[in-house]
Amino acid sequence: MNPPQPAPPVLPDLAHPQQGLAPRALSVGEAQALLGQWCGQRAHELLKREGATENVALEKSFGRTLCQDIFSPMDVPAHTNSAMDGYAYRWEEMAPNESRRTLKVVHTVLAGQAWGGQVGPDECVKIMTGGVMPGGCDTVAPLERVREMGADSGLVQIELEARLFQAGDNQRLKGEDLQAGGLALAQGATLHAAAMGLLASLGLSHVRVWRALKVAIFSTGSEVLALGAPFKSGHVYDANRLSLTGLLQGLGLEIVDLGVVRDDPQALKETFIKAQNLADVVITSGGVSMGEADHTKDTLKALGEVVFWHIAMRPGRPFALGQIGQCMLFALPGNPVAMIVTFLALVRPALLQLSGKTPEEPAFLWAQSGEHLRKKPGRTEYQRGQTHVNETGELCVRLTGNQGSGILSSLVQGDCLIVLGHDQGDVEPGDSVKIWPLKGLI
């Protein structure tokens, strides 16, 4: 009998004290583990509700998540066929040391065609890419290795040097991609371009997926200006909401944009209630620090359950999660770089889990540091870096300048995050450091 499994944490349990930079601070690893447990429970509830799946046309399925295994109804390819334009023949009839052989062309097989005849000794067929391999043939000599002996002779001379190609070359075997009854794509797979092509090769025009998670977003702060508004002294334009929109695109989500909300308790309350009615998840930026005008905390506590964390990370640190009715909440820091890094480290994996997607591990690499990096033990740091390959072929990385949490240009100029671990100290030039490539993430 299996031992009983611990119950997933309920929201109040997630607020337990931790050691770190400040009281109740969590390491990044601890925060990720707790979020994973809580989101696993919430995902189970979301994906079991009525209407959780839908049937969509394959051409509109990019980024969506499969809600069931798909098994191949056929062999792919359905027939052994030529992988190149050339001449199909029997390899075994050729002498081991033969360098050339003259063969008679008995037929031409075009793409998608099959020929019912047989190829005899010293015979071959001209075949185009995709043509079904004739009976008895097992090798295709590409056109560039064949010399035609004359337009009317019906003969070709094939170069047979072993260094050029071998028996069985240049043919695609029946079922070598997928076999009938075999698993084509597993539940939880994201439908990207290759996956869509794979399903199309099975003749599928529609596919059943999880309903797209609805994510409402808005920025908070009376100092935040909507795009197009006249600039005012002491104000800033709303960079966070646009960055957040970009971070969410491509995840197979439906984005509900609620704009900018001023620092006013009633306005915040009305927006959260609206988000609760429109979305499955709401993500905000700003209003979770210790400022006197940060009303998000009090508003959330009045409307639902919420947990405020200090994360031992830089940039980042203030973070909140909670639930308003059936709507989940993630409240991110207001500084632009801190918002993006916190999203990547904590929120993005949670959204993928809530969408029913198969978990993915960050694609970390290792690079040689090109300079001294200052680092205090006791927190995880995400410094912005630019990689290059040095003269000996080693991957190297340097900082992109000012690392302040409000310096968006440090991310624009970089192509990776330099991830310095919780217990790690200073890094010296030449030391190996972990990097997180940003391509495809931001």
Image: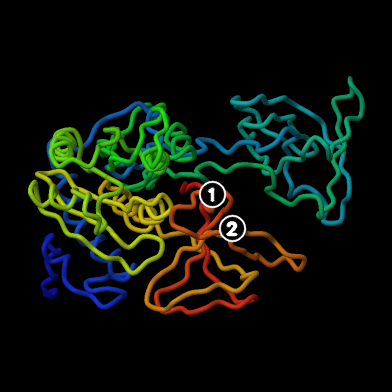
Asked if residue 193 is positioned above or below residue 36 in the image, the reply reads above
Q: Position of residue 338 (x, y in %)?
A: 39, 55
Q: Position of residue 44 (x, y in %)?
A: 17, 51
> Going from the N terminus, do you reach mark 1 or mark 2 first?
2
Mark 1 sits on what residue? 409
Q: Are marks 1 and 2 in contact (CB under 8 Å)?
A: yes
Say left or right for 165 vs 420. Answer: right
Residue 149 in view, yes or no = yes
Is 186 in front, or is 291? 291
Residue at image location 27% in from the left, 45% down from the top = 284
Say which element carries label 2. loop
Residue most extreme to the top: 152
Say left or right for 395 vs 101. Answer: left
Say left or right for 118 vs 215. Answer: right
Is 211 in front, or is 38? 38
Residue at image location 76% in from the left, 68% down from the top = 392
Circle on res. 400:
2
Residue 72 in view, yes or no = no
Residue most extreme to the front: 233
Is 328 in front, or is 160? 328
